[in-house]
């Protein structure tokens, strides 16, 4: 049986030992006192039982456990005859050097000596062994808890050779782990550096009075899609650990300004879940319960502001050759369970926006770590702004744009933009525009879901649309006006029955027919500067493209009458309060908000979105029993799709589903 040694039986050590035992190795588990070794083995026993209950190990737990051999205070004895040592003792360089020196003396000459350190330099540790062994000293950094977390960072010191890296990758594969290679032992490697940037940004935003803890966490969870908010995660990990790693990184030259809120918690010994209180309060020490973080709390927080410092760090790692872009993103996705890596997120946010946001951080705080990395500036200067230009850190299918007489149609990956383009007429809806909108909607519905999953309608210039083009009304007969009205109504019904979500981005005046168009969309996001209204009454007539019907359904009969009878325009914020728009955002953030919401919807199963849209739009108009029948039928239909299989199996396997719209 192949043998390995694990030095240190604590949180990380016992987990690493357990993994190797499951993989069939004889594991020599060492700690300084009998008590510590015994506790480590008890923890392994408990964990193996859990895994067996869930059917995640095939072997009998007792058989696995029998491969773990205890060693008390005897590194030399434990490394005898092993092919690998993994050290996981306290994060104290002197202690680690002693372990390595002793292991070097007693282990077979071909044995690889690895450290699980998260904060200390591999190069310095390697210098504790004889020069000819140094190429075999390497970082093998697991994440807590090792049994569950899928990632191992393989960290090269100055002396580590490629063969050693390859060997560690093979061991990790045998343990069922995925790996990334960290080419230089910079403090914090990849994952802890990126995490530190998000924690600091979150904390400084609160410390500077720009947001509350709940607002920041809510934005990170619900807008960025992270599994936990920064503050919840620090509570969960232990704020003492955050302080410890932060201090260690700072001492080794990681540019940062420890945030007073975190430092304070450490001084007050409010470490988070383990002590019953950290940034949030918990029912009892050691008892985790999700703190209350409402989804709406993060509404006004700009997540790119929270994420830009992490992108900056990722750019630094890439420019310095610490890791490849793929490995940086992979490390963050697997180590922190983010839905996307920081460089992928940068491409979505727009690299120009990231740079602008960092400049804002730099100016507000004066901190040098927020100075945009030269790599980011270089990419922006070369016109590669991310997904929107078809290239950023990664290359995307290029956006295609075509100009019709009254519209611009842009196809970005997953998103079709229909841009009303008669700015000199405030995008008034002319007969030509109606004709072109019909054609484009038909064209989009013909396209595969691989190409377009979400449609965004917005406008150029000062208006989304100031309404139907009144010049077309001059000299018309009542019957032609009736037909015009019906035509617009049917166009808007076409939007309601389009088989994919339509988001309207209200960039300015949204009046009359413009508001009627917007109300037929599934969602409305407005620039704060937009004004909305049904001003027809001022011209002597009434809304004729659904305004008298959709407006009362959206905001209630009496409020609708108020708007239609007075013809008054209301600002976007008030429209948000009334429920007429889903959300009002600063004008310069509108495009980004539209894109990020569209990207979020684009990851959902397209057929299920279509069915949900139909059930809601058509069911709402029917008697409830008929709506229920429709819902049941749509629900049933979805069980003929591949996406349901993908969704359910991904849930059970704890992986991210990739829906295809089939
Ligand atoms: N149909 C045709 N043309 C329109 C229009 C519409 N619905 N709305 C605006 N325009 C034209 C204006 O006539 C003007 O054209 P011009 O430069 O040839 O004079 C141009 O767009 C710019 O509008 P203007 O009125 O000069 O801008 P403003 O900033 O002073 O006012 C509004 C903006 C939106 C308040 C004003 O244009 C307005 O009230 N429009 C009509 C809104 C309406 O009643 N819609 C319902 C129609 S069913």
Image: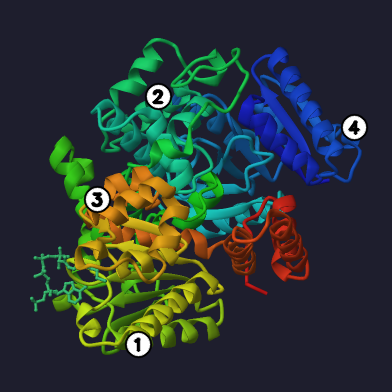
Q: Quadrant of residue 361?
A: top left
585 or 287, which lies in front? 585
Residue that carries the numbered disc 3 in the rendered image = 570
Ligand 1 image position (quadrant): bottom left
Instruction: Report the residue marked by disc 4.
Output: 62
Disc 2, SS: helix
User: Which marked residue is nearer to the observer: mark 4 or mark 3?
Assistant: 3
Can you tell which of label 1 and label 2 is closer to the viewer? 1
Q: Quadrant of the C terminus?
A: bottom right
Distance, label 1 to label 3, CA atoms, is 31 Å
Circles 2 and 4, Cβ within 8 Å, touching? The answer is no
Question: Measuring 79% from the left and 42% from the top, which residue is drawn there?
Answer: 22
Spatial separation of the CA atoms under disc 2 and disc 4: 38 Å
* Residue at left offset 72%, top offset 14%: 34
Dot 1 corresponds to which residue? 480
> Badge 2, how many Cα within 10 Å: few under 14, some, many 20+?
some
Q: Is mark 3 within 8 Å of ligand 1?
A: no
């Amino acid at each position: 049986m192949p043998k390995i040694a694990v030095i240190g039986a604590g949180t990380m050590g016992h987990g690493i030992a357990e993994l190797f035992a499951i993989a069939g190795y004889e594991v020599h588990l060492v700690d300084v006192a009998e008590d510590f070794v015994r506790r480590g083995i008890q923890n392994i026993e408990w964990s193996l039982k859990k895994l067996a209950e869930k059917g995640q190990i095939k072997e009998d737990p007792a058989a696995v456990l029998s491969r773990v051999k205890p060693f008390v205070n005897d590194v030399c004895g434990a490394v005898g005859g092993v092919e690998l040592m993994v050290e996981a003792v306290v994060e104290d360089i002197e202690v680690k050097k002693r372990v390595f020196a002793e292991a070097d003396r007693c282990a077979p000459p071909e044995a690889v000596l690895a450290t699980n350190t998260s904060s200390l330099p591999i190069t310095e540790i390697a210098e504790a062994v004889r020069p000819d062994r140094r190429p075999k000293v390497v970082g093998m950094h697991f994440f807590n808890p090792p049994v569950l977390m899928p990632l191992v960072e393989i960290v090269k010191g100055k002396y580590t050779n490629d063969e050693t890296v390859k060997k560690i990758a093979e061991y990790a594969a045998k343990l069922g782990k995925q790996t990334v290679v960290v080419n230089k032992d910079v403090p914090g490697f990849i994952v802890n550096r990126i995490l530190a940037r998000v924690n600091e940004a979150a904390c400084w935003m609160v410390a500077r009075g720009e947001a509350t803890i709940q607002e920041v966490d809510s934005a990170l969870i619900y807008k960025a899609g992270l599994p936990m908010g920064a503050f919840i995660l620090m509570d969960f990990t232990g704020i003492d650990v955050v302080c410890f790693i932060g201090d260690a990184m700072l001492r080794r030259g990681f540019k940062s300004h420890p945030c007073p809120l975190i430092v304070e918690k450490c001084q007050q010994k409010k470490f988070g879940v383990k002590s019953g209180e950290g940034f949030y309060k918990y029912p009892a020490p050691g008892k985790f319960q999700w703190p209350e973080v409402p989804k709406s709390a993060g509404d006004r927080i700009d997540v790119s502001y929270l994420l830009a410092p992490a992108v900056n760090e990722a750019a630094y790692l890439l420019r310095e050759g610490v890791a490849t872009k793929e490995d940086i993103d992979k490390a963050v996705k697997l180590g922190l369970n983010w839905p996307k890596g920081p460089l992928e997120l940068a491409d979505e946010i727009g690299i120009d926006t990231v740079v602008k946001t960092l400049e804002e951080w730099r100016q507000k705080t004066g901190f040098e770590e927020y100075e945009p990395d030269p790599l980011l500036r270089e990419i922006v200067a070369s016109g590669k702004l991310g997904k929107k230009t078809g290239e950023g850190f990664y290359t995307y299918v290029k956006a295609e744009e075509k100009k019709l007489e009254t519209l611009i149609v842009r196809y970005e990956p997953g998103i079709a933009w229909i841009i009303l383009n008669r700015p000199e007429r405030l995008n008034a809806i002319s007969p030509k525009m109606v004709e072109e909108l019909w054609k484009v909607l038909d064209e989009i519905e013909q396209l595969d879901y691989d190409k377009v999953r979400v449609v965004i309608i917005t406008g150029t210039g000062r208006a989304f649309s100031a309404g139907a083009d009144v010049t077309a009304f001059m000299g018309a007969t009542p019957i032609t006006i009736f037909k015009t009205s019906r035509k617009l109504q049917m166009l808007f019904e076409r939007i309601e029955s389009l088989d994919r979500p339509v988001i309207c981005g209200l960039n300015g005046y949204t009046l009359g027919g413009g508001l009627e168009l917007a109300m037929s969309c599934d969602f409305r996001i407005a620039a704060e500067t937009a004004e909305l209204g049904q001003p027809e009454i001022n011209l002597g007539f009434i809304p004729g493209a659904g305004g008298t019907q959709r407006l009362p359904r959206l905001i209630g009969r009496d409020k609708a009458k108020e708007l239609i009878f007075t013809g008054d325009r209301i600002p976007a914020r008030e429209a948000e309060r009334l429920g007429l728009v889903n959300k009002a955002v600063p004008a310069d953030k509108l495009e980004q908000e539209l894109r990020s919401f569209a990207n979020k919807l684009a990851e959902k199963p397209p057929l299920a979105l279509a069915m949900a849209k139909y059930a809601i739009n058509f069911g709402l108009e029917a008697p409830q029993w008929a709506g229920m029948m429709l819902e049941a039928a749509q629900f049933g239909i979805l069980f003929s799709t591949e996406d349901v299989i993908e969704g359910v199996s991904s849930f059970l396997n704890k992986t991210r589903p990739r829906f295809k719209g089939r």
